[in-house]
Image (cartoon, helix red, strand yellow):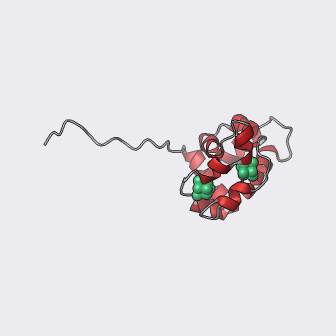
Amino acid sequence: MDFGFTISKPRSIEPTEAGREQLLQLEEQVPTFRRCMNCGGCTATCSAGQFTDFNIRKVHNLYRWGQYKELDEELQKCMLCGKCTLVCPRGVNLRSLIIHLRKALNKDHQPGDYQHFIRNNNR
Ligand code: SF4
Ligand code: SF4
């Protein structure tokens, strides 16, 4: 029967194959990341978000999309105060996640050189 409307397709953006692998790696290094239910509590209470346009949800998306330059710039805005970790109802250690991402993006390389990260994550 035609009701004149259809159910919308899911609007979430799926990561690429490489992106999916990166997500799994990140979940291994920060296991609590698996518990995230996207409630937005961390973004709403973020200290940096009160003074800049920093949005921790955007960090997650940039990582999934492989936009490392933008991701690195975004991560510099975080003050590592840990408030997001304190308020998270699922106990996600976001502070640890950010520290890990910062290290992974700049490990043994000049700031701004992301080729190593892209190579390592596109094997
Ligand atoms: S507060 Fe915790 S569960 Fe909610 S979006 Fe942030 S990390 Fe995910
Ligand atoms: S640790 Fe970073 S992301 Fe978390 S509340 Fe503080 S400034 Fe925001």
Rendered view: 28 above or below 119: below
Q: Residue furthest left?
A: 1
110 relative position to 74: left or right: right
Image coordinates for residue 49, horizontal then vertical, percent: 70, 42
Residue under the point 73% across and 47% down? 47
Q: Quadrant of residue 48?
A: top right
24 relative position to 107: left or right: left
Q: How many marks?
A: 0
**Quadrant in which the N terminus appears:** top left
Rendered view: 121 above or below 82: above
Viewer-nearest residue: 123 or 70: 70
Residue under the point 15% across and 39% down? 2
Residue under the point 58% across and 62% down? 35
121 relative position to 100: left or right: left
Image coordinates for residue 122, horizontal then vertical, percent: 64, 44
Image coordinates for residue 107, horizontal then vertical, percent: 83, 47
- Look at the image and tell me whether residue 94 can be seen: no
Viewer-nearest residue: 19 or 47: 47
14 relative position to 117: left or right: left
- Look at the image and tell me whether residue 62 can be seen: yes
Residue under the point 75% across and 36% down? 73
Viewer-nearest residue: 56 or 83: 83
Image coordinates for residue 104, horizontal then vertical, percent: 77, 49
Q: Quadrant of residue 50?
A: top right
